[in-house]
Image (spheres, rainbow, N blue to C red):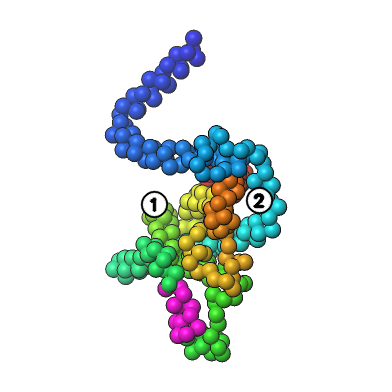
C-alpha cells in the first residue's frame, strides 16, 4: 500500500514538474527529433555489415554473410596500420589540445587589462570558424620549403641550415596534425575552462593572498583543483572520439609520401569501402569504431568513479 502510494506521489510530482517546465520541454523537442532522425534511425543500416549489400535490392533481400565482413576487416594488414595512425593522432590531439586549452585559460584569467584580454581571446578562437579547406592551405603555406614562415624563422634563428619538408616526412605528420589542431581549436577549447574558472569563489583567492600565496600557488592549489571536475568530464566525453581523429584535416594535408601515416578510419572507410563499392565492409568498420568508442567512454567513466573524480553517471 505504501509502495503504491509512493509511486503515485512520484508520478504526480513528475507530471507537475513537466507542466511547470513545459516551455523548456517544447524548446528541446526539435533537438530530440534531430537526434532520433539523424542518430538513431540510421542504426537500422548496421544490418548491412552482416550482408553482401548491393544497391538496388531491398535491404532484407540481400545475401546474408554473417560476420564475414568483420573477418575481412581483422585480416586486413591496412586495418592495423589505420588503427595505429588513428590512436596516435587522437592521443596527440587530445593531450596537446587539453593542455594548451587549460594553459591558455589560466593565462587569460590572469590578465587584468580587460581590453587586451578580450582581444587575445577573440584572436585565439577565430581560427575555429575557419573551414579546414582554408586552414589546410594556410598550414601548407606556413610549412612550405619555398618561403614558408616556419622554415624561414627556423633558418634565421640558425636552428636549421636548409628548409625541412614537414609534410613529406612520415614520422612528422602526426605532430603536424597535432600542432595545427591546437592552433585551430585552442581558443575555442579554452572558453569552457574560462567559464569554469569564473565560477570559483573569489573568497578562496582572498584567503590565499592573506596566507601569502603568490599567483602560481593560487593557480596550483585553487584554480586547478576547482576546475578538475570540468577536466574530468571533458576527458571522459573526448574518449568517445578517440577512434575518430578527424577526416578533413588528414585528407587535405596528406600526400603520397605520408599516406601510410595519414590514413585514419574515416579515410579507410572511404578508400577501401565506399570507393570500391564495398558498402557492407565500410559499415563493419563504422560499427567497430562505434562499439569501441562506447566501451572507452564507459571504461573511462568507471575509472573516474574508482578514482573519486567527477563522472558522467
**242 or 248, which lies in front?**
248
**Magenta span covers which residues?**
138-149
* 110 and 254: which is toward the camera: 254
Which dot, 1 or 2, sits closer to the camera? 2
Question: Crowdedness of circle 1 by 10 Å Cα count: few (<14), some, many (20+)?
Answer: few
* Distance from Cα at disc 1 to Cα at disc 2: 48 Å
Tell me the element at label 1: loop
Seen in the picture, residue 214 relative to 275 is either above or below; the reply is: below
Q: Which x, y percent locates residue 17?
A: 35, 28
- Residue 34 vs 247, above or below: the answer is above
Residue 213 seen anywhere in this rendered image of the structure: no
**Residue 106, position in %: x, y?**
44, 63
Local secondary structure at mark 2: helix
* Residue that extends furthest to the right in the rendered view of this protein: 75
**Is any atom of residue 30 visible in this view?**
yes
Which of 84/270 is in front?
A: 270
Question: Which residue is situated farthest in the top direction here?
Answer: 1
Q: Is residue 141 magenta?
A: yes
Total labels drawn: 2
Vertical arrangement, residue 297 with respect to residue 13, above or below: below
Q: Residues within 10 Å of mark 2 (few under 14, many from 20)?
A: some
**Relative depth, front residue between 273 and 138:** 273
Residue 257, located in which quarter of the rendered image?
A: bottom right
Q: Which residue is mark 2?
A: 73
Q: Residue at x 53, y 62 (%)?
A: 93
Is-magenta flag for residue 145? yes
Reading the image, the residue beneath label 1 is 199
Q: Residue at x 53, y 85 (%)?
A: 163
Amino acid at each position: 500500500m505504501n509502495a503504491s502510494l509512493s509511486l503515485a506521489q512520484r508520478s504526480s510530482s513528475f507530471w507537475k514538474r513537466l507542466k511547470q517546465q513545459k516551455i523548456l520541454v517544447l524548446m528541446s523537442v526539435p533537438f530530440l527529433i534531430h537526434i532520433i532522425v539523424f542518430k538513431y534511425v540510421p542504426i537500422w543500416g548496421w544490418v548491412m555489415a552482416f550482408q553482401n549489400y548491393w544497391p538496388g535490392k531491398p535491404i532484407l533481400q540481400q545475401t546474408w554473410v554473417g560476420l564475414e565482413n568483420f573477418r575481412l576487416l581483422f585480416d586486413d594488414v591496412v586495418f592495423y596500420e589505420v588503427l595505429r595512425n588513428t590512436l596516435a593522432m587522437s592521443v596527440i590531439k587530445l593531450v596537446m589540445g587539453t593542455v594548451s586549452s587549460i594553459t591558455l585559460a589560466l593565462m587569460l584569467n590572469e590578465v587584468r587589462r580587460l581590453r587586451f584580454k578580450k582581444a587575445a581571446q577573440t584572436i585565439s578562437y577565430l581560427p575555429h570558424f575557419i573551414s579546414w579547406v582554408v586552414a589546410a592551405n594556410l598550414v601548407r603555406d606556413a610549412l612550405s620549403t619555398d618561403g614558408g614562415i616556419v622554415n624561414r624563422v627556423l633558418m634565421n634563428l640558425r636552428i636549421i641550415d636548409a628548409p625541412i619538408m614537414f609534410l613529406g616526412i612520415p614520422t612528422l605528420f602526426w605532430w603536424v596534425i597535432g600542432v595545427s589542431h591546437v592552433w585551430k581549436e585552442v581558443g575555442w577549447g579554452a572558453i569552457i575552462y574560462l567559464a569554469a574558472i569564473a565560477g570559483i569563489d573569489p573568497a578562496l583567492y582572498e584567503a590565499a593572498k592573506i596566507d601569502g600565496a603568490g599567483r602560481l600557488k593560487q593557480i596550483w592549489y585553487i584554480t586547478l583543483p576547482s576546475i578538475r571536475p570540468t577536466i574530468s568530464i571533458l576527458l571522459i566525453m573526448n574518449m568517445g572520439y578517440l577512434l575518430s581523429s578527424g577526416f578533413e584535416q588528414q585528407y587535405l594535408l596528406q600526400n603520397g609520401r605520408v599516406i601510410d601515416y595519414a590514413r585514419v578510419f574515416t579515410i579507410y572507410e572511404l578508400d577501401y569501402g565506399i570507393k570500391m563499392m564495398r558498402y557492407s565492409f565500410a559499415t563493419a568498420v563504422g560499427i567497430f569504431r562505434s562499439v569501441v568508442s562506447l566501451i572507452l567512454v564507459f571504461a573511462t567513466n568507471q575509472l573516474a568513479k574508482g578514482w573519486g573524480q567527477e563522472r558522467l553517471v
